[in-house]
């Protein structure tokens, strides 16, 4: 199924039914009086998070959603039936924003969570509500109120504990394949990954965390280079970023340090909050780099890096288990341990 993480829709809640102006006319009810019932309320529109969905593709093609209107009131004190609510099922992690003000209307982060998107209109009053001692035969009634209408932007942000960053071909997809059951495409050309993917890293029977892989980010992404910033939103909910650095030639030493700084600058351009998240360096492809340890030390000195770092070879799994254990300790609130 095609991965769609953005959509724009219109939601129109149901109009409330009109009240009724009617009078009792039974044979044995003298001076029967008013008997017009109220109109039913209009149907509302709700959003429901469903863990069985993983894309917004349904909303790319069905853009207008209308709830049922309420029925009008009738005579003999009969009230109109309320309109049925409309429920829009979306993947967990979907954000609804008002298209005009960009205000967040709903943020669904848990399976089964519901949020009201548009409230149905209130039903009108029948003439039985207007009778009084001086108005025995009222003909007044009120119309039903219109339901709320709004245009919404939908954004899907994947729920993951850890996010992978790096230039194209840094080995992010190979890494996530090495540590989880996820199977993103791997090839020897840039931008192999075109869509985000999730993998569950299991440390023990009762210990695991979720890792997210997004397409490679390159310098100039803020100006639209490569795939731009369009997938960085999927890292906004993560607690830790793993920045993969390619150790294989020609990237090494000063060139690796320059790429790390460039990618950090792109993060800041997109979202300062994302740039402030904890970020660890993961030097990958150690099996292909001559004197890999020396290259790593030169890069760390150039960057003056004081945070945790690791050296791995994702293709054969070397160093990956130690990294995953350190990530789990960090997510559990423990110190990450030795960065070797």
Image (cartoon, rainbow, N blue to C red):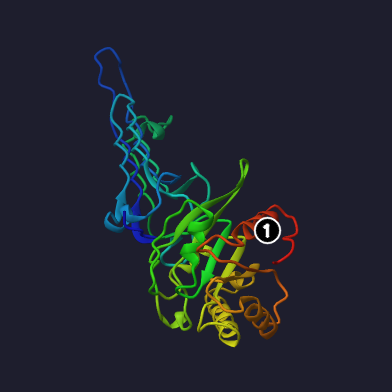
The residue that appears at 46% across and 80% down in the rendered structure is 222
Q: Position of residue 276 (x, y in %)?
A: 64, 71
The residue that appears at 36% across and 58% down in the rendered structure is 3
Depth check: give the residue in front, 222 or 29: 222
Depth check: give the residue in front, 95 or 310: 310
Q: Secondary structure at mark 1?
A: helix
Depth check: give the residue in front, 119 or 1: 1
Depth check: give the residue in front, 25 or 158: 158
Mark 1 packing: few (<14 Cα in 10 Å), some, or many (20+)? many
In this rendering, is residue 253 above or below 231?
below
Q: Residue furthest bottom?
A: 254
Residue 20 visible in this rendered orientation of the protein? yes
Query: Residue 244 occupies which quadrant of the picture?
Result: bottom right
Q: Is residue 322 left or right of residue 235?
A: right
Q: Position of residue 35 (x, y in %)?
A: 33, 27
Instruction: Name the residue tied to disc 1.
Output: 326
């Amino acid at each position: 199924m095609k991965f769609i993480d953005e959509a724009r829709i219109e939601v129109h809640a149901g109009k409330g039914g009109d009240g009724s102006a009617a009078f009792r006319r039974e044979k044995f009810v003298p001076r029967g009086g008013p008997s017009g019932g109220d109109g039913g309320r209009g149907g509302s529109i709700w959003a429901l998070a469903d863990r069985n969905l993983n894309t917004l593709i349904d909303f790319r093609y069905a853009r207008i959603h209308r709830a049922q209107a309420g029925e009008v009131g009738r005579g003999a004190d009969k009230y109109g039936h309320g309109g049925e609510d409309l429920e829009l099922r979306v993947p967990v992690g979907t954000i609804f924003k008002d298209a005009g003000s960009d205000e967040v209307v709903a943020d669904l982060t848990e399976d089964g969570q519901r949020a009201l998107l548009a409230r149905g209109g209130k039903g009108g009053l029948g003439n039985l509500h207007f009778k009084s001692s001086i108005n025995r035969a009222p003909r007044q009634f009120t119309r039903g109120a219109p339901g709320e209408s709004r245009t919404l932007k939908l954004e899907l942000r994947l729920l993951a504990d850890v996010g992978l960053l790096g230039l194209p071909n840094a080995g992010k997809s190979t890494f996530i394949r090495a540590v989880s059951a996820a199977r993103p495409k791997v090839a020897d050309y840039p931008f192999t990954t075109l869509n985000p993917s999730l993998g569950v890293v299991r440390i023990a029977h009762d210990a695991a965390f979720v890792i997210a892989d997004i397409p490679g980010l390159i310098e100039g992404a803020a100006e639209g280079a490569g795939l731009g910033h369009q997938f960085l939103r999927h890292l906004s909910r993560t607690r830790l970023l793993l920045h993969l650095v390619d150790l294989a030639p020609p990237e090494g030493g000063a060139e690796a340090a320059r790429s790390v700084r460039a990618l950090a600058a792109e993060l800041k351009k997109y979202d300062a909050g994302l740039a402030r998240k904890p970020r660890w360096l993961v030097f990958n492809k150690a099996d292909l780099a001559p004197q890999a340890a020396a290259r790593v030390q030169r890069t760390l000195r150039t960057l003056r890096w004081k945070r945790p770092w690791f050296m791995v070879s994702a293709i054969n799994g070397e160093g990956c288990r130690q990294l995953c254990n350190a990530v789990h300790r960090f997510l559990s609130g423990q110190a990450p341990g030795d960065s070797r």
